[in-house]
């Protein structure tokens, strides 16, 4: 099978994406697949021919362009088969406020939250809090605020990456994740990070 691996991209998560892409490329080669690594910073359209020649594209991109529905919509438009979620679900999931609303409407528990747009906005929750950009991952711009005196610095940090800041009640506990492959739910995995922050 010929697999094209997209990696890099313009987001703040570029380095994470490059590591993802290289690890996937190595695994695919070890399994005997014909693999091509396509790394870019801004112009993914230049790879249109290579992507069309692949049997499937592994989307190893993180953050803006790669996870927010932009590249998914472009590949859909160009009839390119790729891994991961489609354009609409990607756009929805990258927006933490919208995805939390969907979860809550389905009866799933999620920490209380609110959206703020600047340092002067009132936060109705008491510490501890999680303050982060509404549309980032990999702990980019994320702070756990245990002391209200640290709130302004946390908001400033998050605003480096977005004008929409999500503030959540901090819930201590284990970090659990699971993957879905097609219609199959894979086993639950506990994430144990060597750092305090893992998003």
Image (tube, rainbow, N blue to C red):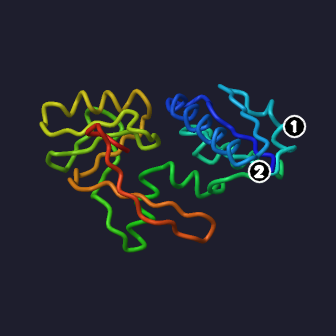
How many dots with numbers? Answer: 2
Which sits in the foreground, 174 or 121? Answer: 174
> Image check: 171 left or right of 80?
left
Q: Position of residue 42 (x, y in %)?
A: 67, 26
Q: Residue at the spot x=75%, y=47% of the render?
A: 32
Q: Position of residue 34 (x, y in %)?
A: 79, 42
Question: Which residue of the protein is positioned furthest toward the bottom in this rendering?
Answer: 107
Q: Quadrant of the C terminus?
A: top left
Q: Secondary structure at mark 1?
A: helix
Q: Secondary structure at mark 2?
A: strand
> Image check: 109 left or right of 106?
left
Q: Residue at the spot x=77%, y=50% of the render?
A: 56
Which residue lies under the disc numbered 2? 56
Which residue lies under the disc numbered 1? 49
Find residue 64 and name its label.
none
> Image check: 125 left or right of 140?
left
Which sits in the foreground, 49 or 36? Answer: 36
Q: Position of residue 70 (x, y in %)?
A: 66, 43
């Amino acid at each position: 099978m010929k697999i094209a691996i997209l990696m890099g991209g313009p987001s703040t998560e570029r380095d994470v994406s490059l590591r993802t892409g290289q690890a996937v490329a190595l695994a695919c080669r070890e399994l005997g697949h014909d693999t091509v690594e396509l790394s870019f910073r801004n112009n993914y359209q230049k790879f249109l021919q290579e992507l069309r020649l692949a049997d499937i594209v592994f989307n190893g991109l993180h953050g803006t362009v790669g996870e927010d529905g932009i590249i998914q919509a472009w590949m859909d438009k160009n009839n390119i088969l790729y891994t991961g979620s489609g354009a609409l679900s990607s756009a929805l999931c990258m927006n933490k406020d919208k995805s939390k609303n969907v979860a809550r409407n389905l009866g799933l528990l999620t920490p209380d939250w609110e959206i703020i747009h600047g340092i002067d906005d009132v936060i109705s929750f008491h510490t501890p809090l999680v303050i982060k950009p509404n549309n980032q991952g990999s702990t980019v711009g994320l702070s756990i605020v245990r002391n209200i005196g640290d709130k302004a610095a946390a908001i400033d940090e998050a605003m480096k990456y977005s004008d929409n800041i999500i503030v959540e009640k901090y819930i201590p506990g284990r970090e659990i994740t699971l993957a879905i492959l097609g219609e199959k739910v894979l086993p639950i995995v506990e994430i144990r990070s060597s750092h305090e922050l893992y998003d």
